[in-house]
Image (spheres, rainbow, N blue to C red):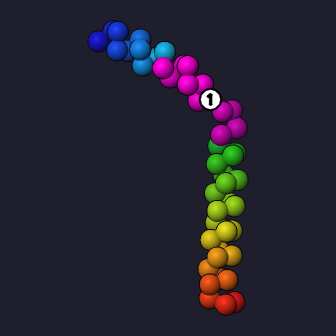
Amino acid sequence: MADLWRFQTREIADAQLVAEDEDAQLAAEKLVLANAEKLYTAAKSGA
């Protein structure tokens, strides 16, 4: 079991998944996608 834990820990560390501003990036992307959906809906309805 200890070998599995060491392997998983090493894999996570090697993946370098840390983004300090990830929350801000995701919030900005969510805003863009929400606006894109509004534009699509308006264009589709002919508004």
Identified at 62% across, 71% down, the residue is 37
Relative horizontal placement of residue 2, taking residue 24 as reference (left or right): left
Q: Residue furthest left?
A: 1
Relative horizontal placement of residue 3, taking residue 24 as reference (left or right): left
Q: Position of residue 47 (x, y in %)?
A: 69, 89
Q: Quadrant of residue 5?
A: top left
Q: Quadrant of residue 18?
A: top right
Q: Is residue 25 above or below residue 33?
A: above
Element on which disc 1 rests: loop
Identified at 66% across, 83% down, the residue is 42
Q: Position of residue 21 (x, y in %)?
A: 70, 38
Q: Residue furthest top?
A: 2
Identified at 68% across, 76% down, the residue is 39
Q: If the image is split into quadrants, where does the N terminus sit? A: top left
Relative horizontal placement of residue 46, taking residue 12 as reference (left or right): right
Q: Is residue 16 magenta?
A: yes
Residue type beneath disc 1: Val
**Region in magenta:** 11-22
Pointer 1 residue = 18
